[in-house]
């Protein structure tokens, strides 16, 4: 019988969610975005999603195969949606989980990628993968590098390709691939999310529906000393970043990663200053 993901209300104590994450590598958070927040987010990204080209040119043929040709992509979200930048990326539940999962391995974590993945009818099951393979040069074992989530912006069903995850796979040897019967599916209503460790095996399910698109938001964070998948400072340049709260600016990579207290150094300075201070002083 296929395994099931644990499901917890998003307002459960973070310690409970963290315990489930440590155990299974993934957990469904029910009702992470309340209906009003979900509506505002969807409204702000609607035009960008509608005009995204599923046949877009990707960085290389492997990435094109990974995503397939029936998916609309929208990234650079902090520039496109203030609701994303201030309320979703800075969601207190997600940040509290990041505190627990990522702070053991860094002085501060940052946004890795906010990416709407709108999968159309006919989209095939995605190659199962671990997100942390992006950073293949980091020797293993390593501290947890990434915490990710897939937030349902429309309902996720078995038919429309709800995300597949292999519970416990964050502890498997890296070369073990799951059997189909080891996969759980994150069936959930819009506004809920599946949160997973960057070491957990997962992939999008096939969209076997005739018409409905399945709109999800991949939202992930990484330890602040790591190169992020999206260049968030270029995607959200200073003229936008200076209108955002400081917490959002730091998540977007405008803060230095300061490991001096741990007898380390710092990364991300501009002219030996912290870009956050330069933004505040109007010098950036
Ligand atoms: Fe992934």
Image (cartoon, grey):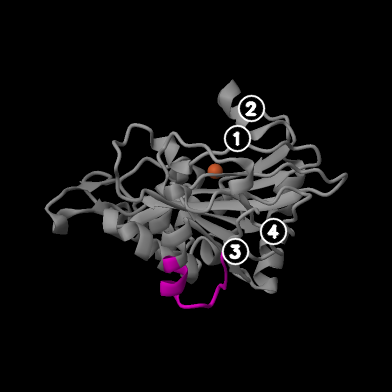
Label 4 Cα neighbours within 10 Å, binned few <14 / some 14-19 / many ≥20: many
First in sequence, mark 4 or 3: give its number: 3
First in sequence, mark 1 or 2: give its number: 2
Q: Residue at 77% across / 42% down in the picture? A: 120
Q: Is residue 56 magenta?
A: no
C-alpha distance separating marks 4 and 2: 24 Å
* Residue 87 located left or right of residue 141: right
The residue labelled by disc 2 is 65
What residue span does the magenta drawing correspond to? Answer: 6-19
Up/down of 211 relative to 187, above or below: above
First in sequence, mark 1 or 3: give its number: 3
| Of the two numbered discs 3 and 2 in the rendering, the one whose residue sits closer to the viewer | 2
SS type, badge 3? helix
The residue labelled by disc 3 is 83
Instruction: Kindly check if marks 1 and 2 are in contact, taking CB atoms under 8 A apart as contact.
Output: yes
Q: Residue at 65% across / 69% down in the picture? A: 37
The residue labelled by disc 1 is 127
| Of the two numbered discs 4 and 3 in the rendering, the one whose residue sits closer to the viewer | 4
Percent position (x, y) of residue 32? 59, 69
Percent position (x, y) of residue 149? 54, 55
In front of the other: 9 or 251: 9
The residue labelled by disc 4 is 187
Percent position (x, y) of residue 221? 44, 53
* Residue 214 located left or right of residue 243: right
Label 3 Cα neighbours within 10 Å, binned few <14 / some 14-19 / many ≥20: many
Up/down of 36 relative to 78, above or below: below
First in sequence, mark 4 or 2: give its number: 2
C-alpha distance separating marks 1 and 3: 31 Å
C-alpha distance separating marks 4 and 3: 25 Å
């Amino acid at each position: 019988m296929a395994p099931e993901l644990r499901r917890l209300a998003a307002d459960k104590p973070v310690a409970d969610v963290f315990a489930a994450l440590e155990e299974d590598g993934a957990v469904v958070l029910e009702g992470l975005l309340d209906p009003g927040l979900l509506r505002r987010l969807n409204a702000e990204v609607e035009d960008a999603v509608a005009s995204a080209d599923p046949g877009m040119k990707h960085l290389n043929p492997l990435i094109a195969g990974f995503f397939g040709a029936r998916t609309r992509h929208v990234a650079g979200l902090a520039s496109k949606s203030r609701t994303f930048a201030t309320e979703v990326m800075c969601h207190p539940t997600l940040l509290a989980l990041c505190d627990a999962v990522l702070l053991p391995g860094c002085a501060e974590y940052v946004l890795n990628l906010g990416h709407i993945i709108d999968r159309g009818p006919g989209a095939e099951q995605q190659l199962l993968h671990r997100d942390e393979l992006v950073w293949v040069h980091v020797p293993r074992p390593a501290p947890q590098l990434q915490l990710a989530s897939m937030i349902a912006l429309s309902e996720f069903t078995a038919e429309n390709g709800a995300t597949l995850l292999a519970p416990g796979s964050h502890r498997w040897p890296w070369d073990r691939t799951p059997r189909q019967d080891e996969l759980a599916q994150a069936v959930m209503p819009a506004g809920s999310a599946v949160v997973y460790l960057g070491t957990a095996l997962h992939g999008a399910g096939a969209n076997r529906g005739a018409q409905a698109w399945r709109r999800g938001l991949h939202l992930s964070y990484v330890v602040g000393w790591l190169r992020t998948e999206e260049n968030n400072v270029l995607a959200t340049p200073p003229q936008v970043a200076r209108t955002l709260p400081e917490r959002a600016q730091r998540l977007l990579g405008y803060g230095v990663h300061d490991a001096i207290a741990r007898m380390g150094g710092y990364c991300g300075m501009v002219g030996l200053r912290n870009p956050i201070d330069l933004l505040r002083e109007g010098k950036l």
